[in-house]
Every structure is written in structure tokens, then in C-alpha cells.
Image (tube, helix red, strand yellow):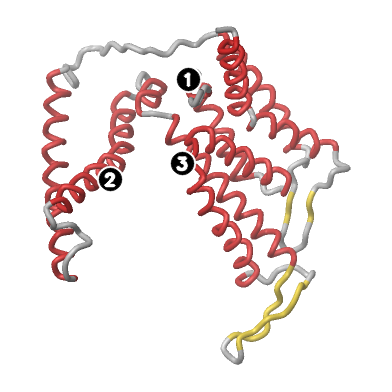
């Protein structure tokens, strides 16, 4: 079975989870929390994208190493000097410190985890789910946001189709001299703009024919139902977030890299409890998918 079971839960469950993952990934710079965020973000992205995820994950590893190594080059805070470097008379001697290196690792992990969560969010939180969650509160704003989020993927897909079509007749953007490449690219851009304008007119006509903006109270139809499994997961997430919030207020997530190194250690009860709660929260999608996978194999074995 190759499907994302977590995406089939109620949109509110998906949205709350990703909000928690985003906030935790951006504000928790404790090494243990960053490690949990990176691991579960990569695991969930692998589940969402399948084998196609390996290409993106392989690109993120050099990016993480680059961010880690480069940070101490520009930041010299800290008193634990690993070595001193310079480039002749162009750049004077500058210390390469442990604090700056660890801070670079934390920032790199934070950046990668948030990037992976956003990629998974974009794959799971479709326009229909977003419109379902916020359409009743502000239909106009929700509709505009939904249409804006669709613009870039639609333009990329159409540009690829136009480029492939022109390549088939020997006028691709990668063929000919530089001036010919520019000419072919401008032709594709012109066709893309014409398609976008025509699509806007067709969308406006379609909305008008469906009664949009007529002034009457709109009705709505939804295929989403808040079931018992959604209530169970919601209660679990709320409990874990509550524990995590208490641990954060008690200093369990403390991690300071400037000007000196100060990180809550494993002897702090709130750090241990916070890491466990954070890991369990981030593991919810993977746990749901694992449970569904086991159920599927059990049912399949009975056939």
C-alpha cells in the first residue's frame, strides 16, 4: 500500500499538526529538539512523496553542511576557539569558535526541518482543505489565497507543456544560438501570458455563472466529516502540546549560543519530558501511516 493515511484525516487535524510543527521547528533551537524535527520531517516527507523524496533529501544534506560550516566564518562569538584563520592581508585573523559552529548546526537543522514541513504541507493541505477550513469565516480572502497558491504550480506546468511542444518542432529553449534561445524563451513567455489572461477571463465567467457575488447567502458542500478517530488524534495532540508548553515555560527547551554556550542538559526533567512530548507529537503522522500499513497487511493476509 502506497498512500498517505494522515492526509485522509480531517483538514483541521492536518492544519493543527503543521502549525505545531512549524512553530516548534522555528523556535526550538535545543539540539535534541532540532534533531527530532529534522528526523521526523524527513520521515514524513519520505512517506508523502515516496521514492521521489530521496532526490530532495540528498540536496538538503550539502545545504545543511554549508550552513553549519559557514556560520562561524561570519560570526566570531564564543570563547571556545577551535582554530584561527585568515586570508593574507585581505582578512585579518578571525577565531573559528565552537559556539558559532553549534549555532550554525542548529540554524541549519531548523531551516531544513521547516523546509521539509512546508513541502509536506503543500502536498497534503490542498486548496479544497484550505477553503473548507477558512471559507466560512472569510470566503473572499480564502478564495483569493487559494487561487494565488495555485498560480505558480499551474504556470510551471503550462510552461513545461509549451516548452515541450516547441521542442517537438525544433524550436526549444535549449536549441540554437543564444539569440535564438532568447527568442524561443520570449515566445513561450508570450504564450504563457496569453494563456493566463484567457484563464482569468474563463475563471471569472465560471464564477459568475455559479452565482458568485450575487449577494445571497452562499451554501456549501463538504466531503469532510469530523469522526471519532479525528477526536482521538486531536485530544492526543492537545495533550502533547500542553506538556510541551509547560516544559518550555520551565526552561526545558533553553538553548543559548551567544555570547556563551548554555543548553539545558539531560539532567533537567523538563528537557526530557519536552523532548519525549515533542517527538511523540511529530511522530503522529508516521504512527498513523504505520498503523494503517499494518492493518492493510493483516487484512491482505486473510484473503
Residue appearing at x 60%, y 43% in the figure? 25
Q: Is residue 9 above or below residue 189?
A: above
Q: Nearer the viewer, mark 3 or mark 1?
A: 3
Residue appearing at x 71%, y 76% in the figure? 95
| Mark 3 crowdedness (10 Å alpha carbons): few <14, some 14-19, many ≥20 | few
Residue appearing at x 59%, y 37% in the figure? 43
Q: Nearer the viewer, mark 3 or mark 2?
A: 3
Q: Is residue 7 above or below residue 66?
A: above
**Nearer-N-terminus badge (2/1):** 1
Instruction: Name which quarter of the figure residue 131 lies in.
Output: top left
Across and down, in percent, residue 46 comes to: 54, 37
Which residue position holds label 2? 156
Q: Is residue 290 above or below residue 200?
A: above
The residue lying furthest to the bottom in this view is 89
Which residue position holds label 1? 8
Placement of the C terminus among the 4 image quadrants: top right
Which residue position holds label 3? 52
Q: Which mark is residue 194?
A: none
Instruction: Name which quarter of the figure residue 266 lies in.
Output: top right
Across and down, in percent, residue 8 comes to: 48, 20
**Nearer-N-terminus badge (3/2):** 3
| Mark 1 crowdedness (10 Å alpha carbons): few <14, some 14-19, many ≥20 | few
Residue appearing at x 58%, y 33% in the figure? 20
Amino acid at each position: 500500500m502506497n498512500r498517505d493515511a494522515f492526509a485522509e484525516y480531517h483538514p483541521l487535524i492536518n492544519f493543527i499538526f503543521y502549525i505545531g510543527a512549524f512553530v516548534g521547528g522555528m523556535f526550538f533551537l535545543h539540539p535534541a529538539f532540532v534533531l527530532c524535527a529534522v528526523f521526523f520531517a524527513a520521515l514524513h516527507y519520505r512517506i508523502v512523496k515516496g521514492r521521489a523524496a530521496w532526490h530532495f533529501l540528498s540536496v538538503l544534506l550539502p545545504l545543511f553542511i554549508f550552513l553549519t560550516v559557514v556560520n562561524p566564518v561570519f560570526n566570531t562569538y564564543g570563547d571556545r576557539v577551535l582554530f584561527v584563520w585568515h586570508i593574507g592581508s585581505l582578512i585579518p585573523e578571525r577565531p573559528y569558535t565552537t559556539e558559532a559552529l553549534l549555532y550554525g548546526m542548529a540554524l541549519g537543522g531548523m531551516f531544513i526541518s521547516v523546509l521539509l514541513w512546508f513541502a509536506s504541507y503543500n502536498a497534503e493541505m490542498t486548496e479544497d482543505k484550505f477553503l473548507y477550513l477558512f471559507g466560512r469565516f472569510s470566503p473572499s480572502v480564502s478564495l483569493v489565497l487559494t487561487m494565488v497558491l495555485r498560480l505558480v504550480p499551474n504556470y510551471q506546468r503550462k510552461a513545461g507543456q509549451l516548452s515541450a511542444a516547441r521542442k517537438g518542432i525544433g524550436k526549444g529553449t535549449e536549441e540554437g544560438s543564444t539569440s535564438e534561445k532568447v527568442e524561443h524563451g520570449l515566445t513561450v513567455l508570450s504564450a504563457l501570458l496569453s494563456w493566463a489572461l484567457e484563464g482569468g477571463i474563463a475563471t471569472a465567467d465560471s464564477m459568475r455563472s455559479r452565482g458568485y457575488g450575487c449577494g445571497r447567502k452562499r451554501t456549501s458542500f463538504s466531503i469532510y466529516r469530523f469522526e471519532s478517530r479525528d477526536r482521538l488524534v486531536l485530544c492526543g495532540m492537545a495533550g502533547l502540546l500542553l506538556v510541551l508548553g509547560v516544559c518550555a515555560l520551565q526552561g526545558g527547551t533553553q538553548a543559548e549560543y551567544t555570547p556563551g554556550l548554555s543548553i539545558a542538559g539531560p539532567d533537567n526533567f523538563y528537557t526530557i519530558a519536552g523532548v519525549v512530548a515533542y517527538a511523540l507529537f511529530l511522530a503522529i503522522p508516521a504512527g498513523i501511516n504505520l498503523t494503517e500499513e499494518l492493518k492493510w497487511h493483516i487484512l491482505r493476509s486473510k484473503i
